[in-house]
Image: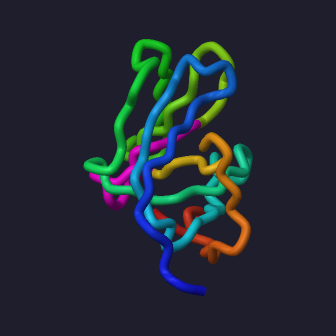
Amino acid sequence: MGQRAVDRYIGSCHCGTVRFAIETDFPELTTCDCSICRRKNALMVKVHESAFELLAGEEALTEYRFNTHTARHFFCSTCGIYPFHRKRVTPDWVGVNVFCLDGFDPEGIPVRATDGAGMS
């Protein structure tokens, strides 16, 4: 598969209160087996904070931290959807739930499983 172009994608929570934009070429998508990711079953793309822009809904975001309280998981306080999180090991990167991206189809992008459960 050839390299994808870096494009801008718009995403949102279910109710549309939280809206954001990312720029990425989708080098890979990731899943995680930590206790929260198993439950939310998100498929994520990692983007640097410079390629992420929160467009609307900052006041509606609810933050959840657990275990080491380093990773910052964000949820819409209106509809409950998880659109993104600040990563634990690389906090200047954002893990974005690709199912929140408008019109995005993950077909054909490699998926890497990460070992979140094994992190101490």
Residues in magenta? Answer: 83-94
The residue lying toward the viewer, choosing from 69 and 51, is 51
The residue lying toward the viewer, choosing from 19 and 65, is 19
Residue 7 horizontal/vertical position (percent): 44, 57
At 70% across and 74% down in the image, what residue appears?
108
Q: Quadrant of residue 81?
A: top right
| Rendered position, 11 above or below 6 | above
At 51% across and 39% down in the image, what residue appears?
10
> Seen in the image, is 106 located left or right of residue 46?
right
* Residue located farthest toward the bottom when viewing the structure as drawn: 1
The residue lying toward the viewer, choosing from 77 and 53, is 53
Quadrant of the drawing holding the N terminus: bottom right
Q: Is residue 90 magenta?
A: yes
At 26% across and 49% down in the image, what residue appears?
50
Q: How is the image coloured?
A: rainbow
Residue 85 horizontal/vertical position (percent): 46, 43
| Rendered position, 49 above or below 57 | below
Residue 111 horizontal/vertical position (percent): 64, 73
| Rendered position, 98 above or below 100 | below
How many marks do you count on the picture?
Answer: 0
Residue 80 horizontal/vertical position (percent): 66, 24
